[in-house]
Amino acid sequence: MSGRPLIGITSYHDMASWGVWQQPAALIPYTYVSAVTRAGGVAVLLPPQQSGALEAVSAIDGLLLAGGPDLDPDTYGQDPHPRTGTPNSERDDWEFAVLGEALRQQIPVLGVCRGMQLMNVALGGRLIQHLPDRLGDVAHQPAPAVFGDQSVRVRPGSRLAPILGTGPVPVRCYHHQAVAEIGHGLLPAAWCGDETVEALEMPERDFVFGVQWHPEAAPEDNRLFEALVEAASKNSIERENA
């Protein structure tokens, strides 16, 4: 492999302001970029677009499905809950296409928050649209732009356990939705104390993980991104030698 692995990060298409400008932009919290580069990778943004998933995935060594707004409930056969956000079909369609290509091309995948939910729905799973209805509290998303501090236990024998240990693992959460029914080919890999599924994995693949928390918001623990970059490096070498 020549150089560091390229990690594609899915991003927003949203209105933004900078300098004298206020216009649509492709953007992502820079914490994702920092986490990838700190782990030894090169971050490449993959903004929503009409086509090109095959070419985009062919050019990268690993995929990071970033957090963001709620998925359209229509993608998993439900009517919207009053607290579910406005659908963004452009981003949903793009990320379903990119994930599909990543799985087909067998490159490493890490889904974060929305990214884990998208993985689950893409594989036939369903979501709880408003977690406080089930739990009776807002501990996973205490207030706008405020992370909830949680602790998760990782399933012994899971593929995630060698990366994070079995717990308790302190994490930072910001989600009001969660997994209801798990998609085909996925297994739960971590839970928090209220039994909310906080991680999923595909046991038939070396590196396909989704975590409901935000590891990029905890720079003191970069293990997930280091594992993603390591898996992407191996993937790049295997591609070159194929």
Image: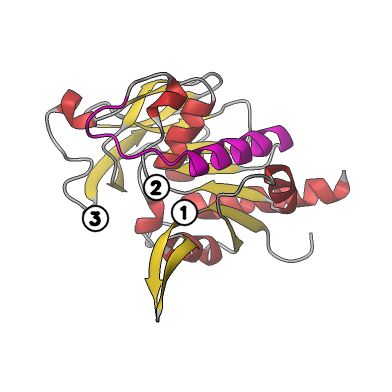
Residues tagged 1 and 2 counted as in contact (Cβ below 8 A): yes
The quarter of the rendered structure image containing the N terminus is: bottom right
Judge by depth and name the residue closer to the eye, 171 or 93: 93
In this picture, is 85 found above or below 66?
A: above
Mark before the other along the chain sequence, 1 or 3: 1
Q: Which residue is mark 3?
A: 145
Query: Residue visible at 84% across and 51% down?
Result: 240
Separation (CA) of disc 1 from disc 3: 17 Å
The kind of residue tagged 1 is Tyr
- Residue 204 included in the magenta stretch of the image: no
- Residue 12: image tag: 1
Q: Amino acid at mark 3?
A: Ala
The location of residue 30, given as percent across then percent down, is 44, 65
Q: In the displayed orientation, state which residue is furthest to the left.
A: 136
Point out the stretch of residues depicted in magenta.
80-105
Mark 2: which amino acid? Gly
> Mark 1 or mark 3, which is nearer to you?
1
* Left or right of residue 16: residue 183: right
Q: Mark 2 highlights which residue?
A: 68
Query: Residue 217: where, in percent of width, then height?
Result: 35, 57
In the figure, 48 relative to 1: above or below? above
State the image quarter where residue 2 is shown. Answer: bottom right
